[in-house]
Image: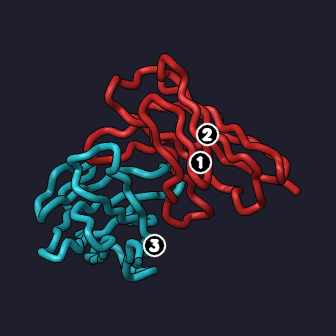
Chain colours: A cyan, B red
Amino acid sequence: EAGVTQSPTHLIKTRGQQATLRCSPISGHTSVYWYQQALGLGLQFLLWYDEGEERNRGNFPPRFSGRQFPNYSSELNVNALELEDSALYLCASSLALGVMAKNIQYFGAGTRLSVL
Amino acid sequence: DAKTTQPPSMDCAEGRAANLPCNHSTISGNEYVYWYRQIHSQGPQYIIHGLKNNETNEMASLIITEDRKSSTLILPHATLRDTAVYYCIVRVPGKLIFGQGTELSVKP
C-alpha cells in the first residue's frame, strides 16, 4: 500500500514568487494536514483539510493557503514568498477524525522549499 | 504551545533498552499520548499511542503512569538505526503539537 506522497521533493523559488506543493494521502484517508519545519523552529502545524473543507489552521499568515480536491489530494500554496519560508513542508493524512484512537497521522517525506 | 516536556538528548548503547521519558502534567482525561520519531529530516514516523493503559507493538512499548502525568517510551533492543529525534505529543483534535523532542543517539 502506497504511503503519503509529496511532490516535488525539492523546490527553489525567489522572493516574491508563488510556490505550490502537492500531497496525495494514503488510500482511504480523508483528512490531510500540512506542517512546516523551519530550521531551529521545529514542526509547526499549518493547515488541516477534511472532506474538502479547511477545518483548522495554525498561526500562519493568509498567504499560506491550500485546498483539498474530491479525490482527497491536497495542494499547499504559498504566495509572496519570503526568505523565512524556506523550510521542509510535510504533509500527513489520516482517517476521519471520528474515532480518536484510530486517528493516526502518517507523514510523507516532505518538500524542501528554498527561497532565494 | 507543546503540552509535553522531554530531555533534549539521550545516549543509549546498541542492544540495550532505550527508555525515553516524557512529562505531560496538564493532559486532559480524553487526550491521547502519541510518539513519533524523525530520522534526519525525513517525515516523522508514527511509533505508538495510548490513553491510560500500557501499550506494546512491534516497534516499542509505552508505559503511562496511573495519574497520566508522564509516560515512557521503551525501545527494547536499540539499534543504530533507532538514532533519531523522538517526539512525545499530546493529541488535540485536528493537529499534532510537536515540542522539541529528545535526540536519541544509539552508540556501538
Sequence-first disc among 1 and 2: 2
Query: Alpha carbon of mark 3 to alpha carbon of mark 1: how far?
Result: 21 Å
Report whether B24 appears left or right of A85.
right
Residue A13 x/y as whole percent:
37, 79
Q: Say whether residue B49 is visible.
A: yes
Q: Residues within 10 Å of mark 3 (few under 14, many from 20)?
A: many
For disc 1, the marked residue is B86
> Which kind of residue does numbered mark 1 sit on?
Tyr
Distance from Cα at disc 3 to Cα at disc 2: 30 Å
Please give the name of the residue rendered at 14% of the width and 57% of the height, measured from the top-left corner: A54
Residues A76 and B45: in front is: B45
In this view, B12 is above or below A116:
above
Name the kind of residue labelled 2 in the image.
Leu
Marks 1 and 2 close (CB-CB < 8 Å): yes
Mark 3 residue type: Arg
**For residue B73, which numbered disc appears in the image?**
2
Residue in the image at 51% along x and 19% along y: B66
Distance in Å between CA atoms under marks 1 and 2: 9 Å
From the image, state whether disc 3 or disc 1 is nearer to you: 1
Label placed on residue A112: 3
* Element type where label 1 sits in the image: strand
Q: Position of residue A77 (x, y in %)?
A: 24, 71
Chain hosting mark 2:
B
User: What percent of the width, then of the height, locates residue A44?
Assistant: 39, 50
Residue drawn at the location 56% of the way across and 50% of the way down: B57
